[in-house]
Structure formats: structure tokens, C-alpha cells
Image (spheres, rainbow, N blue to C red):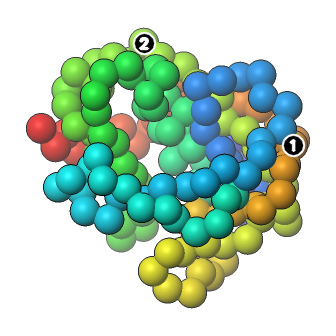
Amino acid sequence: MSIEKLKQMEEEGKHVFHGSPEGDIESLEPRQGRHVPDWSQPSETILDGNPAVCATPYAELAAFRAIINGKNIPINHTSGFGIRDGKVDFEISSKEVLDMAKEKKGFVYVFDRKEFEPYNRDKEATQDAMEWRSHKTVSPIEVVEVGFDDLTSIDQIKITE
């Protein structure tokens, strides 16, 4: 499984990860992030900080985003993730999304953590932040293909329909 390699890199603490359905990206440029302040109205978003390349120190979160996204799941849906009580927590809007994801693949881009800084929209960010950002164009040091089977915590997924 590809996730094993990514988890080893995660444990080293020297990398951050970015998930994408595209596998041929040579570099990522800063883009304007958006935030959903009220999940009861997921179509209403606000700007989230300055333009940046977003990544996470948690490999499985990047794998989730690489597989469950608008390109791979071309129906109206919502999805989210987080770390709660030290465990990965996933949410998707329907069983249909889950079923579609089982046949999809994606790519996790691995970056040098030194090119990023921790980010938190609600409080001062610390080194254990779930999201890290770079405000410059960055090139991956490695790209790893992932599939649904690489989501080892998927049994903890919450379907919100």
C-alpha cells in the first residue's frame, strides 16, 4: 500500500502532504483558499487567509482529499476531515459518494516541511497544526499514487445524509 510509504515520511516529521486527483503537477502556485463558516449552508464560503499552497503533516488526510474531490466525485457533495482525540475523522455527505470513491485514485504530493508554516484561522498556529501553508510556488520532492484502500481509517467515516 502506498499509504505505508507516506506514513513513514509522516513519522519523520520533515514533510507535508497535498492531495490532488491530478498526477502530473510539476509545481503548485499559491491560490486563494475559501472557508465554509457554517456547514448547514456549505455553499456559502468566505476568503481564508492570503493565497497559499495548502498542505498537511497528516498523510491520510491528503490521501482522502486526493480521492474525494470534485473531479473524482462529479456530483454535488460535501466532505471534510480532521483530527479528534488523536484519531482521523472523516465526513462525507452520502453513501453514493463513498461508493464512487471506492473506484477512484489520486496523488499525494510530498513537500519539504521547511517550505511551509503552520496555519490556523481561529488561533495562533503551532507546530502540530493540521494545515500548513506556503506563500510561494513549491515543487514536490515526490508524488505517490493512492487509492481507496490506502484510506486505512475509512471505517471511521461519518455519512451526514
Residue farthest to the bottom? Answer: 124
Q: Relative to residue 3, is residue 123 drawn left or right?
A: left
Query: Looking at the image, can residue 42 be seen?
Result: yes
Of the pair 19 and 158, the residue shown nearer to us: 19
Of the pair 39 and 141, the residue shown nearer to us: 39
Quarter location, residue 19: top right
Quadrant (top left/top right/bottom left/bottom right) for the C terminus: top left
Q: Is residue 91 above or below residue 16?
A: above
Looking at the rendered structure, the kind of residue marked 1 is Ser
Q: Position of residue 115 (x, y in %)?
A: 84, 62
For mark 1, does the 10 Å Cα neighbourhood hold few (<14), some (14 to 19), or many (20 or more) residues? some
Q: Position of residue 98 (x, y in %)?
A: 29, 26
Among numbered discs 1 and 2, the one appearing first in the sequence: 2
Report the residue at 55% width, 55% height from top: 33
Quarter location, residue 139: top right
Q: Position of residue 145 (x, y in %)?
A: 66, 24
Callout 1 secondary element: loop
Report the residue at 49% width, 62% height from top: 47
Callout 2 secondary element: loop
Report the residue at 49% width, 85% height from top: 123
Q: Which residue is denoted by mark 1 in the rendering?
A: 139
Q: Position of residue 133 (x, y in %)?
A: 69, 63
In the rendering, which numbered label is found on residue 25?
Answer: none
Report the residue at 66% width, 77% height from top: 127
Quadrant (top left/top right/bottom left/bottom right) for the N terminus: top right
Q: Relative to residue 151, is residue 158 drawn left or right?
A: left
Q: Is residue 51 above or below residue 156?
A: below
Q: Which residue is denoted by mark 2 in the rendering?
A: 103
Q: Is residue 41 above or below residue 79?
A: below
Q: Are marks 1 and 2 in contact (CB under 8 Å)?
A: no
